[in-house]
């Protein structure tokens, strides 16, 4: 989805920007291949490289149902992660949110919840959506907290939905009504 940054894309903690191929870097690839960073990402099953990251970004940019943003932390002065809104279902006014804070120095600073709140504001005021959904592994307490801080509530649980380290893991389903 092509989009233009507006003041809604910034807060005191973060600045969101449209992720483009030039933002693919060795550091970004490193996040995706870091076992601690990718522990709860489905991309953990594939070794990533610059070509695969650029291809993923290009696919997201070309898809009208996806808004894929980088997250920059002004305090750290760099790109620290990504947030994706998509797929967007305009017929029903829905969007799915996924986030990765790859830079470990950005962990625990409230960056994830600020980015989630930011994309919720974009979804409501710029895209006219009415509801956002998200999911996280039950043991990913940091992700669940970040979504809750950004106004999401638990809607349900899919028992033993994923395998994590060979053991069944629940999927926590969360949502935030925008209007």
Image (cartoon, rainbow, N blue to C red):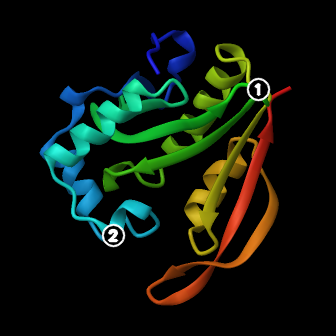
Give the residue at x 32% y 35%.
57
Q: Quadrant of residue 162?
A: bottom right
Q: Is residue 81 left or right of residue 28?
A: right
Residue 39: give x, y in percent of width and height. Answer: 40, 70
Label 1: how many residues lie within 10 Å, few (<14), some (14-19) or many (20+)? few
Give the mark nearest the N terminus, 1 or 2. 2
Give coordinates of residue 138: x percent, y percent: 64, 72
From what the image shows, is residue 100 above or below residue 77? Answer: below
Q: Is residue 28 visible?
A: yes
Can you say whether 45 is above or below 165 in the image?
A: above
Query: Which structural element holds mark 2?
Result: helix
**Which residue appears at 64% of the width and 13% of the height?**
126
Marker disc for residue 91: 1
| Percent x, y of residue 3 | 47, 14
Residue 161 vertical position relative to residue 98 in the rendered view, above or below = below
On residue 82, the disc is: none
Q: Using the image, determine if residue 34 lies above or below residue 104.
A: below
Mark 1 and mark 2 in contact? Answer it, CB < 8 Å.
no
Residue at 53% x, 23% y: name it.
11
Which residue is the site of mark 2?
45
Q: Using the rendered view, name the quadrant where residue 159 is placed.
A: bottom right
Please tell me in which quadrant of the rendered image residue 19 appears. top left
Identify the element where label 1 is drawn.
loop
Q: CA distance from mark 1 to mark 2?
A: 33 Å
The residue closer to the viewer here, 9 or 95, is: 95
Identify the residue at horizontal 41%, vertical 49% (top origin). Answer: 101
């Amino acid at each position: 989805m092509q989009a233009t940054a507006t003041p809604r894309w910034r807060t005191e903690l973060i600045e969101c920007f449209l992720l483009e191929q030039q933002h693919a870097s060795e550091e970004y690839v490193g996040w995706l291949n870091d076992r601690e960073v990718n522990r709860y990402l489905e991309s953990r099953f594939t070794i990533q490289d610059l070509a695969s990251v650029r291809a993923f970004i290009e696919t997201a940019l070309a898809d009208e149902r996806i808004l894929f943003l980088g997250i920059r932390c002004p305090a750290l002065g760099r790109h620290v992660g990504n947030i994706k809104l998509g797929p967007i279902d305009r017929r029903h006014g829905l969007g799915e949110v996924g986030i990765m804070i790859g830079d470990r120095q950005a962990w625990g600073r409230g960056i994830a919840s600020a980015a989630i709140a930011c994309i919720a504001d974009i979804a409501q005021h710029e895209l006219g959506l009415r509801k956002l959904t998200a999911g996280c592994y039950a043991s990913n307490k940091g992700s669940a907290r970040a979504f809750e801080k950004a106004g999401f509530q638990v809607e349900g649980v899919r028992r033993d939905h994923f395998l994590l380290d060979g053991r069944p893991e629940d999927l926590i389903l969360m949502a935030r009504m925008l209007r």
